[in-house]
Amino acid sequence: MNEHTRILARAASSLPVTISETDYQAKGFHALLVVESCHDISALAQALLSLNYFIGFVTACHTEPAIQVLYQFARYDVNHRIMIQCPVDENNSVPTICPVFQGADWHERETRDFFGVTFVNHPNMNPFILDESDRDLKPLLKNEKILKSTETIFGQGDQHDR
Amino acid sequence: MTVEQLTPDQKTAEQHRFYLNLGPQHPSTHGVLRVVLEMDGEWVLNPQPDLGFGHRMHEKMGESRSWPQFFANVGRMDYVNAMAFNHGYAGLIERAAGIEVPLRAEYIRVITAELNRVASHLLWLGAFILDLGAFTPILYTFDDRESILDILEDITGSRLTYSYFRVGGVMQDIDDTFITKTKQFIQQLRNRFPMYETLVSNNVIIHHRMKGIGVISQEMARRYGVTGAVLRGSGIAYDVRKNAPYSVYPEFDFDVPVGKNGDCMDRYTVKFAEMEQSLRIIEQALDKLPDGEFRTKVKGKIKLNPGMTSFSVETARGELTFLLIGDGSDVPYRLKIRVPSFSNLSVMPELCSDMLLSDLVTTMGSFDLVIPEIDR
């Protein structure tokens, strides 16, 4: 296992997070962290901040049964890039990580615009990129015809080293 | 609390407070960006950028067509440094489909991308100084930039919104005319640098306007995900070309200029120094340019590997990341585009509170914003 992934695994050992190493040359990131319950995302963000990670972006991907919120973090000092996958809860929401990474503010608002995911305790969950009249448009949700399951999209490849 | 309940002092303060719209049509926002400023006299209390005026939903377009059809879109996000976006998207698809690129193609990519970076920096240099009130420099930087656009137009066919890169290589090979012209240009720009330094970099007014203004600490940069020259001004030598090398960048000898204080002056110095580094890369690439194919044959309907693939490049403004989530077909299931200016600008509400309006314009100029890139 990569040295930095090991440090990360140790820091996140108390959290219910599954860490798997990925092939950087093939995938473009070193590790994938799957968070079982979205309530632990703030604690994980706090751990990442203390380990000197910076926030890349926050986005989501619409799959069945739940939308997956995706975070990317990387480091300035070494080449280590990670992806975090976190399913939304039954209310289509995820706790915000704004108090830890203030840069997440805009990314989370954008994700709300595009997917309708609510970030709990976010200071300003109002339309950002989209117009006020498109508040409920959610343009990046898939229609039933092309909607795929989380298993199909994320199940293979990423979970295991290939 | 009603106005009647306020103390006389508070009443005066309340009377001085007002809202000011900077943009969406304002020369210093460099595009259709609106910033709602809560003002107290000349002081900005709370600046809140309002985005989305140029929003085109590129991500949705990327998810509703096969990957080759999206190529025309990528150059239209950041129209000032379109080559970097070409590079990012081509690299992403190559990684997701496991395609090898010939060495000559990688060299051509680096040369054109770096030329485009210099063009972008020249535009920034002129426009930034124009924001500060000096008109003359932009006439000279545009002259230099024009030479680059001419050179690139000859081989790419367009002046700004390039779609020159192909998955597996580039559209067409570069010729001897291109090489001669590029070498001439490098000489021409190097002759101009002393003039820019004397007239602009060493100008006492410029120093007074930029020193100590808009200081971004390293810790603040991390919290916001700031990248590019804005970050390097704060003393962190993070450049994707060095830290997570892609293409053939490891084969070239170049420095990553860094600042110390993280103010506008440092960001200016870093960006200015980067032009020379880009010229060094171009020179080395032209000298070492290998023979061979400029493109491998790639089938138009290659299936993309399922799962997530990420690819990052360094644009003129910072880190650009494409995240592709494939479902095994040739249409991306999800395509996320992380643009540098978006994260860089998000610092503004914290950074520019309690600042003079003129300093806010300076800070915004030092960010080198391209609004269509932020809005996507």
Image (spheres, coloured by chain):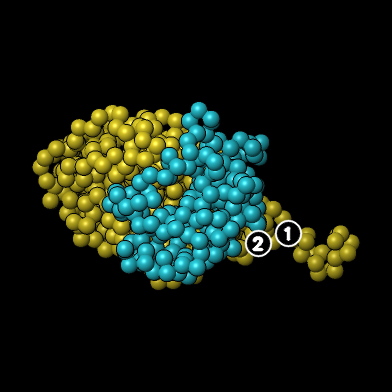
Chain colours: A cyan, B yellow
Query: Does the rendering let one see residue B152?
Result: no
Q: How many marks?
A: 2
The span from disc 2 to disc 1 (Cα, nearest Å) is: 9 Å
For image coordinates 47% across by 52% down, the residue present is: A85
Farthest residue, direction left: B291
| Quarter of the image with the N terminus of chain B in it | bottom right
Query: Does the rendering let one see residue B46?
Result: yes
For image coordinates 37% across by 40% down, the residue present is: B306
Residue B195: mark in rendering: none
Residue B173 as seen in the image, left or right of residue A145: left
Disc 2 marks a residue whose amino acid type is Leu
**Residue B20: percent from left, percent from top:** 66, 51
Write down the quadrant of residue B38 in the picture.
bottom right
Residue B17: mark in rendering: 1
Chain containing the residue with disc 1: B
Question: Which of B358 and A83 lies nearest the eye of the viewer?
Answer: A83
Q: Secondary structure at mark 2?
A: strand
Q: Secondary structure at mark 1?
A: strand
Farthest residue, direction right: B4
**Quick check: marks 2 and 1 in contact, CB under 8 Å?**
yes
For image coordinates 24% across by 40% down, the residue present is: B99
* Residue of label 2: B45
Write down the quadrant of residue A42 in the picture.
bottom right
